[in-house]
């Protein structure tokens, strides 16, 4: 290998190491400001209630305490590639605390938007920003943990790119990278699942309202825990729309009213659905047939061929639920993908 090329690779590797350390230090300093200068300050001054603080800041204090320790470990690695990789490998299970923060972040963002509609709240936030000399809004700081947890695997990917394949260091960095990629995916899946569970709760409430009002006997049982798809489809040959909701074991067909409530049409248990993909004379249509009780069918029409393919795929999937997070617990999923040290089992 040419000496100039080798030196160039070493320089680039050192730059990535510096980037990991410096960005982590900057990140921890920002976390400190959020915890001490916003959260603790407002708590001490009783400007925000404990409930509002929890909703706005989530478990950011827990993330800050962990990140301080993690930064110290990175510093003690003394720019050693294998030691940096071990920092991630030894702590990868602890990073799961970010899932709680990411799940809550949507509520936090909504709360900030609500606060910005109140002149009193605006003055409280702006006054604190002015005192701290912060030009960026509070929301720009609160999103930092979400951004950081999704950046670690990118930094490790860069580090691996400048580590020779014949070095043992390379395999360690790749292993650390793979762990952080999986962690990001698990956090994203968990976040999506919680968001969908929130939507299912909304659907249950609307259906409950419908049952009380019209004495309609519709039951979305507790085992309807995952939302696979939701959207509007046309009734073939008409301009009328139906709102279609695919749960993990049920197809729910409703009509969305202007007030946001759902007008129940029918529901079909997944085991009783037959999907007829081709409708003569209408390539964008497909037919749904119920095989139980009073048999009925719907001929629905998509606007695009890709949309039709999507709905048919989702309908076929619920006949044999393929969602991994639906079938095993979060703990089991973690155990499957992550090595759990002995101390976590005691």
Image: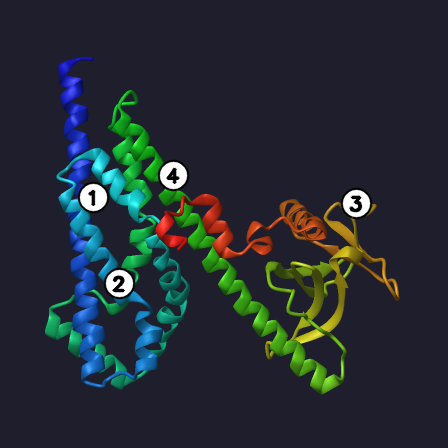
Real-space CA distance between mark 1 and mark 3, rounded to the nearest whole angstrom: 54 Å
Asked if one can make out residue 22 in the rendered structure from this viewpoint, the answer is: yes
Along the line of sight, which residue is nearer the eye, 199 or 333?
333
What residue is at 24 percent from the left and 63 percent from the top?
A: 141
Query: Is label 1 in a helix, a strand or a loop?
Result: helix
Q: Is the residue under label 2 in contact with that under label 3 (CB below 8 Å)?
A: no
* Among the 4 quarters of the image, the one containing residue 96: bottom left
Real-space CA distance between mark 2 and mark 1, rounded to the nearest whole angstrom: 21 Å
What residue is at 33 percent from the left and 39 percent from the top?
A: 176
Q: Which residue is mark 4?
A: 178
For mark 3, does the 10 Å Cα neighbourhood hold few (<14), some (14 to 19), or many (20 or more) residues? Answer: few
* Among the 4 quarters of the image, the one containing residue 146: bottom left
Q: Which mark is residue 20?
A: 1
Query: Is label 2 in a helix, a strand or a loop?
Result: helix
Q: Which mark is residue 278?
A: 3
Check the image and report above or below for 104 versus 209: above
> Nearer the observer, disc 2 or disc 4?
4
Precedes in sequence: disc 2 or disc 1: 1
Horizontally, is 9 left or right of 139 in the view?
left
Precedes in sequence: disc 3 or disc 4: 4
Q: Which mark is residue 140?
A: 2
Real-space CA distance between mark 3 and mark 4, rounded to the nearest whole angstrom: 42 Å
Real-space CA distance between mark 1 and mark 4, rounded to the nearest whole angstrom: 17 Å
Precedes in sequence: disc 2 or disc 4: 2
| Residue farthest along the right direction in this orientation | 294
Task: Where is residue 63? Give x, y as percent.
Answer: 28, 61
What residue is at 29 percent from the left and 20 percent from the top?
A: 166
| Residue farthest along the front direction in this orientation | 346
* Among the 4 quarters of the image, the one containing residue 76: top left
For mark 1, does the 10 Å Cα neighbourhood hold few (<14), some (14 to 19), or many (20 or more) residues? Answer: some
Q: Which mark is residue 344?
A: none
């Amino acid at each position: 290998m040419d000496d100039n090329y080798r030196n160039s690779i070493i320089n680039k590797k050192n730059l990535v190491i510096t980037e990991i350390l410096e960005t982590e230090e900057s990140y921890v300093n920002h976390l400190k400001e959020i915890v001490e200068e916003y959260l603790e300050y407002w708590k001490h001054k009783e400007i925000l209630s404990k409930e509002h603080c929890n909703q706005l800041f989530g478990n950011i204090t827990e993330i800050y305490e962990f990140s301080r320790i993690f930064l110290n470990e990175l510093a003690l690695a003394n720019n050693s590639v294998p030691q940096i990789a071990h920092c991630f490998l030894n702590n990868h299970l602890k990073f799961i605390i970010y899932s709680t923060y990411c799940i809550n972040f949507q509520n936090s963002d909504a709360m900030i938007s609500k606060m910005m509609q109140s002149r009193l709240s605006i003055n409280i936030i702006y006054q604190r920003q002015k005192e701290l000399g912060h030009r960026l809004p509070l929301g720009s700081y609160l999103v930092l943990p979400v951004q950081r947890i999704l950046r670690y695997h990118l930094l490790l990917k860069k580090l691996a790119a400048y580590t020779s394949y014949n070095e043992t260091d390379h395999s360690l960095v790749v292993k650390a990278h793979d762990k952080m990629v999986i962690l990001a995916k698990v956090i994203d899946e968990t976040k999506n699942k919680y968001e969908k569970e929130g939507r299912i709760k909304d659907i249950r409430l609307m259906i409950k309202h419908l049952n009380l009002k019209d004495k309609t006997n519709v039951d979305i049982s507790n085992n309807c825990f995952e939302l696979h798809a939701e959207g509007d489809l046309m009734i073939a040959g008409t301009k009328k729309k139906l709102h279609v909701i695919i749960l993990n074991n049920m197809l729910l067909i409703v009509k969305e009213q202007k007030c946001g409530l759902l007008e129940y049409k029918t529901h079909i248990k997944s085991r009783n659905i037959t999907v007829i993909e081709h409708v003569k004379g209408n390539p964008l249509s497909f037919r749904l047939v119920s095989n139980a009780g009073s048999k009925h069918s719907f001929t629905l029409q998509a606007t695009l061929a890709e949309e039709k393919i999507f709905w048919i795929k989702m309908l076929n999937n619920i006949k044999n639920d393929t969602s991994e997070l639906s079938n095993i617990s979060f703990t089991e999923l973690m155990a499957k993908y992550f090595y759990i040290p002995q101390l976590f089992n005691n």
